[in-house]
Image (tube, rainbow, N blue to C red):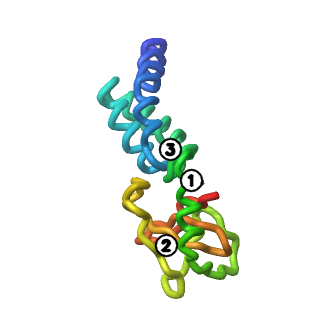
Amino acid sequence: MIRRFIGITVLAATIALPAVAQAQGVPGGIERGSREGDRAAGPVGAVVGGVVGGVVGGVAGVLGVDQRPRFRSYVVERHVPSYHYGEDVRVGAVLPEAGVTYYDVPPEYGVHDYRYTVVNDRTVLVDPRTHRIVEIVE
């Protein structure tokens, strides 16, 4: 019984992995991996797919690896002013509501739920609801 459970889990992860690799970021990876895993192997596959999707999404980030240099150039070309932030600029840091200008990410980057800004000369993607940094674009 345990071997069968492990076999189903491995099968679900194997089937879900290519689909999850296309997901953007941890939340998108978890959601898509769970959905694909559920289709492939039911509830067990959903759990495994969600975990695998979160890991893959975390590695890929919100912007795809191939999009980062192009997006960084896009921001630099616009001469977006840098906001001075007195704390460490890191994923998870919450920026203030006032004083920071948040900009829409152009549609060609496929990032609809986030905004960007420049903080301490670093381009960051921010969740506009919470003002939390979700990715540093370098």
What label sits on residue 109 in the rendered view?
none
Q: Residue at x 49, y 53 (%)?
A: 62
For disc 3, the neighbor class at 10 Å (few under 14, some 14 to 19, many from 20) is many
Nearer the observer: mark 3 or 1; the answer is: 1
Amino acid type, label 1:
Arg
Q: Residue 122 at x, y = what percent?
A: 64, 68
Specify which label sits upstream in the sequence, 2 or 3.
3
The residue identified by callout 1 is 68
Q: Nearer the viewer, residue 40 or 57?
A: 57
Specify which label sits upstream in the sequence, 1 or 2.
1
Q: Quadrant of residue 87?
A: bottom right
Count of numbered badges drawn on the protein: 3
For disc 1, the neighbor class at 10 Å (few under 14, some 14 to 19, many from 20) is some
Instruction: Tell me the CA gap for discs 3 and 1.
Output: 15 Å
Placement of the N terminus among the 4 image quadrants: top left
For disc 2, the neighbor class at 10 Å (few under 14, some 14 to 19, many from 20) is some
Q: Is residue 82 left or right of residue 22?
A: right
Q: Is residue 45 left or right of residue 68?
A: left
Q: Residue at x 37, y 59 (%)?
A: 107
Instruction: Tell me the CA gap for discs 2 and 3.
Output: 20 Å
Nearer the observer: mark 1 or 2; the answer is: 1
* Element assignment for label 2: loop
The residue identified by callout 3 is 57
* Element assignment for label 3: helix
Q: Residue 127 at x, y = what percent?
A: 45, 66
Q: Quadrant of residue 39?
A: top left
The residue identified by callout 2 is 131
Amino acid type, label 2:
His
